[in-house]
Image (cartoon, grey):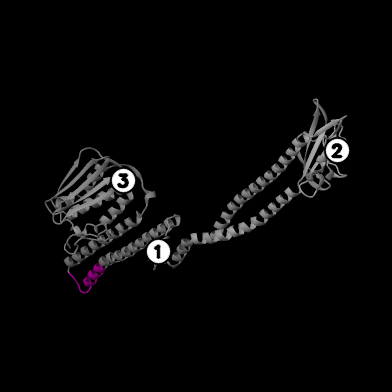
Amino acid sequence: MGTLSFKNRIAFNYIITTALLIFVVFFGIFSIVKYSVYSHINNDIKSEVRKHLTEIEIINDHIGLTHDHEWLEREHNTIAINPVFVQFYDKHGLIGEKSPNLKIKSLKFSKKAPDNQFFDTKLVNKSIRQIQVPIYQNSKKKGYLVIAMSLEDAQMVLKNLSNTLLISYPIILILLFIIARFIAGRSIKPINSIIETSNVITKDNLKSRIPLPQNKDELYILSETINNLLDRIENTIEREKQFTSDASHELRTPLTIIKGTLEVLIRKPRNHEEYEDKINFCVNEVDRLNSIVDQLLLLARFENQRQSLKIENVYLNGIILDTISRYSSKIQSKNIHVSSNFEKDYYIKSDDYLVSIIINNLISNALKYSKENTNLKINISDNYGKVECQITDFGIGIPSEDLLKVFDQFYRSKSNEHIEIKGTGLGLSIVKRLCDLLNIEIKISSQENIGTTIFLSFQ
């Protein structure tokens, strides 16, 4: 079975089931015919018994027929066509009168055989079916009436039927196997398409898709599922290619700046202030490079890592207050007024470390893009059993056409217009990735030059 093709295995399993079913049907047909044939013979014998019991004459314990001309009937005179054998026995088992077609032969009488019961026996090597019926006179048993009929015709019918069934049985199974194999081949045709499509798909060719079958059955669902899987794989690879390209560009930029600065620095002697200024500039670029690397590692680390989550009760108020405290110097330098509206202590079921990263990035962004002498509002509330958090700044805002792109890696809205604001374009992409990982719903609303609000909804 292990070496058979899938098509042949389907046909083979179908044939096994069908073979058992056909065997049961054929056995039923044979049993019904056999029962019908024997019932017909039994009824004929019973009819002969009833007729002869009314024609019996007993004289001095001698049992015979009332009219001898009854023996002249065709069925008692011949053994060629539907013969009926009749014989009388006295109570001692001695042979009495018998039908002429028995000639010198006699029907077998058995004292052990039950009265009025049919049984099969032999008459000169020929199968017969007979019955022994006791004969009574004045409630005393006087002898037996033994009647038999030939089974040769019945056995010939049953033999021909059994031969026909035995010969037709394998022929039917072979024909059904061929038909089943053909139908199975047509049914699994989509699987061949899957194999052919899989063979042409490589890392450089992810555009091919499996043709969907016309019938929306299990193979249709399988083909559709594989096509969806290929779509996801293609999208993932394209994102990885774009990520690699963007990461290379972002890493190359500070390295190029550092290299260029150092090359300029060593071309000729400089005074102390120039050395200090250029070195501090390179240190800032190195810090920027470290920040990019750390955030790239963070993205890679938490890519679909649900199994590593540490779910516990997280004190959301505390995380927000700790983050505000961490950025107190920046808040003071830009003279930003931070207002937090917490009606009570809010706890959520999540990963404390990852939630801290989300809140830290969002507040950091809000402060980075806020204008001086503005407000930063942070609210937490209950909404139909969910804890919701809003972080609102009154900064430069985001154009409506860029709102769908801000979660993309390395994307920075109008970065050329805000050169003074340093960033990597990875903060919000990290936030989005972690929110997806923790089943946190995140939405963003913004107006250019007015401000931005981030909505977080915790399950």
Amino acid, disc 2 = Glu
Who is closer to the viewer here, 54 or 180? Answer: 54
Q: Quadrant of residue 416?
A: bottom left
Q: Mark 1 sits on what residue? A: 209
Compared across the picture, whether 36 is left or right of 71 comes to left
Residues at marks 1 and 3, CA–CA distance in whole angstroms = 42 Å
Q: Which mark is residue 97?
A: 2
| Residue 318, label in figure | none
Amino acid carrying mark 3 in the image: Asp
Mark 2 → mark 1, Cα distance in angstroms: 93 Å
Left or right of 173? Residue 348 is left
Image quadrant occupied by the N terminus: bottom right
Q: Main secondary structure of the magenta part?
A: helix
The residue that label 3 is drawn on is: 352
- Label 1 vs 3, first from the N-terminus: 1
Quarter of the view holding residue 52: top right
